[in-house]
Amino acid sequence: MRKLFLNLIGILLLLICPTIYAQTVEAPSSIAKNILQIELESVYTIQKENNETKKSWSIPSALFRFGVTTNLELQLNTPIIKEELWEKDHLIHSLNKFDDIQFGVSLNLWKEQHFIPETSIMVRAILPTDSKFKIAKIGSIVSLNLANTISEKFLLTYNLGYVVETDNSKSAFYIINLNYDTSSKYHFFIETFGDFANNKFSSVNIVTGFGCNFNEQFTFDLSVANGINHNLFYVGGIFTYAFNTLKNN
């Protein structure tokens, strides 16, 4: 148990996996068979609207990805959030909550061929965690995840998706990420993401960041984001760890 616990707070063991960077965008490549990958993400967000300021921390959120076959993986996302609502300089309320759980699969449809991007489809259910859990309130996410290799150093990854929240609100989203490898150890990226609802973009954001592969076992990504058409700022970091479950038995 102690060995397993220490493994969980590690970051990224590549083993037989391709290089995977821990960024907002979802890569189309699947986790290799029998590999369990754990992504621990902590994000501090400030969002302002009129006289109200909402501050939130993920402390942390955890995404578990397990390779069932070469092209199919299971996914489980368990966010833990601390929120504060301020009006001017006064704290209105503060709470810690176990946010809605996401559970689903990602299926790699095909590999990259010339100009045709590597493509996968991701489907997740959004499960409410409040005391009034009802089947009718389950939400869903469907995303098409794609990637094109521009050169040995540049990789373009992009997601197009649709979300139905547990309150039945609906929106589409996009994420576009350009990654640059300066070496086998360091990489930089720039990303934009946004939501589209009620025939208009409700949010458009720009992100920049960098990552470091400490060795074959550890990788860390740090990013900073700012809202383009709304008042949003966040800074976050992701640690990822993956290991072969058969070799660890």
Image (cartoon, rainbow, N blue to C red):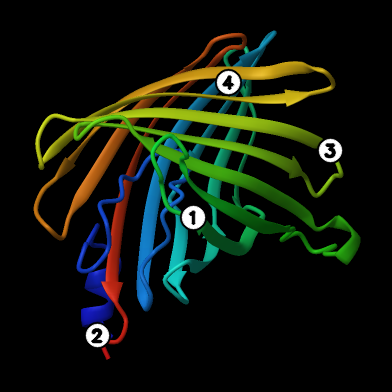
* Three-letter amino acid code of the residue under disc 3: Ser
Relative to 58, is 242 above or below? below
In-image side of 224 versus 203 (left or right): left
218 vs 98, nearest the viewer:
218
Q: Report crowding for label 1: few under 14, some 14 to 19, many 20 or more residues within 10 A (C-alpha).
A: some
Residue 89: x %, y % from top left: 57, 14
In the picture, the disc for residue 248 is 2
Q: Secondary structure at mark 2?
A: loop
Residue placed under numbered mark 4 in the picture: 47
Dot 3: few (<14), some (14–19), or many (≥20) neighbours within 10 Å? Answer: few
The 10 Å Cα crowd at callout 4, few under 14, some 14 to 19, many 20 or more, is some
Type of the residue with mark 4: Gln
Tag nearer the camera, 3 or 1: 1
Residue depth check, mark 4 versus mark 1: number of the one nearer the observer: 1
The label number, if any, that marks residue 169 in the structure image: 3
Which is more N-terminal, label 1 or label 4? 4
Q: Of all residues shown, which one is farthest toward the right?
A: 136
The reply to whether callout 3 and callout 1 are in contact (CB within 8 Å) is: no
Q: Mark 2 vs mark 4: which is more N-terminal? A: 4
Dot 2, how many residues are within 10 Å of its Cα: few (below 14), some (14-19), or many (20+)? few
